Image (tube, rainbow, N blue to C red):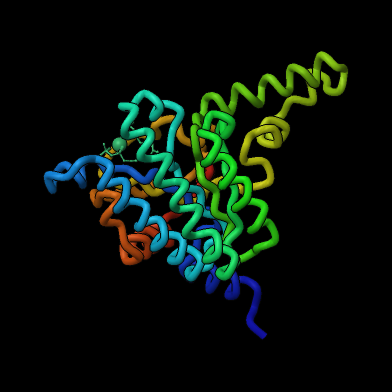
Amino acid sequence: MIAAPLQSAIAAAQPTVPRHVAVIMDGNGRWAQSRGLPRIKGHEQGSKAVGECVEGCRDAGVEYLTLYAFSSENWKRPAAEVQGLMLLLERFLDQKTNEMIEKGVQLRAIGRLEDLPRPCHDRLRRAIDATAANDKLVLTLALSYSGRSEIVDAVRELVRAARAGEIAESDVTPDLIAAHLYTRGVPDPDLLIRTSGELRLSNFLLWQLSYTEIHVTQKLWPEFTKADLLAALDDYSKRHRRYGGV
Ligand code: IPE
Ligand code: IPE
Ligand code: MG
């Protein structure tokens, strides 16, 4: 039998796989532009990179993967680009739902999903229902998502509950707030990956990323491969998370 201190030393020395990986998939437009292609071609290529990332996470033993696919602010883009992105989402759901069922991937979505065009919304609902029993990897797509709106929606629910006399001021704690976010029930991300070298959060998971380790790569999202994912996981395994302690 191995003594307890030794056991914990072995555990600490072993590479740790993040339970939850979140990704800001950025750089599709620049990838296309650098090749003289229209931006939508970058989004097309980017949706292929999603498959690699999902498979890589599943194989590595990651339990939750959350992908920032479309922000609330992205509605400001030219109508043709927005339409193209919505069509790609439809196509992704049409082509990938069976594969997700086969591979044990459970699909979820966060954001103001009611903003999505009807065909996207319907397909999304169907895919979510069809994969609900899967348990190998929980894949969450952030769509029409804004971290600030998520917090606003949670506060509104809490105000309603307080008005109805269901909660008191002293009941409002970080846990109660977390339980009213779109991500309720999902642990906070351990690792955030952002591609294309940008050093900002762009309104993604503002509450949940408080103590998340951040890995930024210069790679543009359409060229992000399994090897890049493994490099990010390796980087994570060397981090020392302190949560404000010593
Ligand atoms: C990320 O790539 C995809 C979405 C935001 C939908 P971008 O479209 O932002 O690509 P860049 O940042 O302009 O290169
Ligand atoms: C963040 O990327 C949103 C997604 C990846 C879906 P953006 O390209 O929209 O963010 P900014 O404009 O660089 O902050
Ligand atoms: Mg961008």
Quadrant for the N terminus, please: bottom right
Residue shown at 59% from the left, 42% from the top: 122
**71 in relation to 197, above or below:** above
**58 in relation to 43, above or below:** below
Out of 170 and 159, give the one closest to the viewer. Answer: 159
Lateral position of residue 244 relative to residue 224, left or right? right
User: Residue 157, located in which quarter of the rendered image?
Assistant: top right
The quarter of the picture showing ligand 3:
top left
Residue shown at 65% from the left, 63% from the top: 134
Where is residue 64? Give x, y as percent.
56, 55
Where is residue 46? Give x, y as percent.
33, 51
Count the labels in the image: 0
Where is residue 221? Give x, y as percent.
30, 50
Look at the image and tell me whether residue 88 can be seen.
yes
Residue shown at 44% from the left, 42% from the top: 68
Residue shown at 40% from the left, 46% from the top: 88
Out of 162 and 12, give the one closest to the viewer. Answer: 162
